[in-house]
Image (spheres, rainbow, N blue to C red):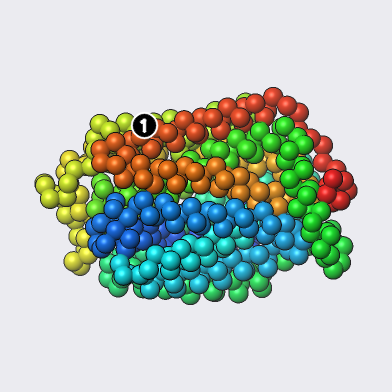
Amino acid sequence: MSKLKSFLGLPDANERVLRLAKIMGILGPLANVTYMLSTTFFVIFIAEALGGGPGMYLQGMGLVGTLVVVQMLVQILLDYPTGAIGDWIGQRYIVASASVSYAVAFFMVSLVTSETPFIYLVVVYAIQGFAQSQQSGAWGAWFDNNYRVAMPGDTDRKQYGVFWGRMGMMMQIFATASLIPGGILAVVFSRPWVFQVQGFLALILSILVFKLVRDFPEVEEQRKGRPEMSEYVSILKGGVSFLFKHRFVRNIVVGGMLATSSIMVWGNLILFPMYFLYLITDVAVASFRTTLFLPNVVAQERSGVWSRRFDPKKWIPRFRFMQTCGFVFFWVFALIMWILPPAPPNGNTLIVYWPFTTVQILTLPLENLLPIAIIFMTFVATSFFGGFAEILTQRVLLDVIPNRIRNSMYSLSPTIATLFAIPQIAIFGWIVAIPGIGFPLTLALCGIISLVGVILIRKGFQHEPPEIDEETWANGN
């Protein structure tokens, strides 16, 4: 037991906190494996189906952008209401329902071909948007509400920060470990087969969530018996009122979500097409991502420990400026793709096979070695800063947001980020497909948007944080 406390960075932990940690230790890694298994090729699979067939993913990226906008519109409409439902009836129902929705989406994606009607994909992305709207913020709200009850002695929340650093490291390990197997399974069996495996894992996850995710009696008591509709409406009203009443909260949340919107553009439109332009194959991309995530595992763990040394007011804006998918990161990548564009795969090519098999680990044009090395070093150099910023921000918000509206506030944040991201993706989806300048221009614009978010965060810390009044916000005032 003492070794577990030491690993989690919770020397004062009691049985209740260890119970929370064990649940997160079971469900977090399973969720990461479930959702990460196909991330290497998911966007490319859809883009190729829309573009006309294998290798034609750039031709389909504009339509992928349209699908992502559909997904985000559904998410933005439902994100905050479902977050408030989590505050109203409990987070386990929301997370379990999200897993079932993901399972349906994965099974439907496994049936997609180049002949699939576009409206079918619209339905798939709408279901994914519904699933994301349910899941966003629910895990964090459930843990934070129960942690505050279980660990009242952690007044400065430094143990909380160390815990999330260690948990992030563990979940990162499982997520990273799923990338290469996902790529190999896609080559040996097929990409649709991997989607079907994810569907089954998502169903298993939903059952475990419903069984294990329970609130402590004190947290449950805050709901005061059987919920009423008026109570739900008050939670909806309370979250929005709280955000706009306090400039400290408003600027930090809105600025953070403006920076996050650029990360959404990166993940949905740029990341995987860029990888495939340089690395060509599923297994090569998965192998590179695995190598790339290894230093990130260390960053996740150390961020919780080292972040204790930094003052949030001073360092959160600086870390956001320097983080992966921050201003510096985007502009470095823009220069890479402008000066060292991807070489065609029909030139001098290095091919590496998985031992004793015909599975290609790496199929790489030699001209791409230098830009890939620079990409790797940029990721490693910026990986620590995002972890520091996230943990410091959570430490600030943990004692600023009332429990009564925590899930709704945590869901309101991605709603704001999605609202910012929708016009970017709608426009950048077509810009990124422009030969020669599409990727560098999109990256540079993402960097500017991220910078504006950092400026807002800095302005937020110029104001005093609000005092929590649970009774007031319970009434939605």
Residue drawn at (33%, 60%) of the image? 50
Instruction: Using the image, determine if residue 358 lies above or below residue 403.
Output: below
Label 1 sits on residue: 332
Q: In the shown orientation, is residue 160 left or right of residue 289?
A: right
Q: Amino acid at mark 1?
A: Val
Q: Position of residue 132 (x, y in %)?
A: 56, 59
Q: Is residue 473 visible?
A: yes
Residue 308, image x and y in percent?
63, 35
Q: Quadrant of residue 37?
A: bottom left
Q: Residues within 10 Å of mark 1 (few under 14, many from 20)?
A: some
Q: Regarding mark 1 in the picture, which secondary structure is present there?
A: helix
Instruction: Name the image quarter holding residue 362.
Output: bottom left
| Quadrant including the N terminus | bottom right
Please tell me which residue is depicted at 65% across the width and 35% down the height of the picture.
Answer: 252
Q: Residue at x 40, y 42 (%)?
A: 428
Q: In terms of image quadrants, where is residue 431?
A: top left
Assign the C terminus to one quadrant of the image: top right
| 87 versus 463 height, above or below | below
Residue drawn at the location 57% of the way across and 62% of the way down: 130
Residue 145 point in image, percent of width and height = 74, 54
Q: Is any atom of residue 195 visible in this view?
A: no
Count every numbered label the image shows and give the total: 1
Relative image position of residue 298 (x, y in whole percent)? 47, 45
Would you say 68 lies left or right of 217 here? left
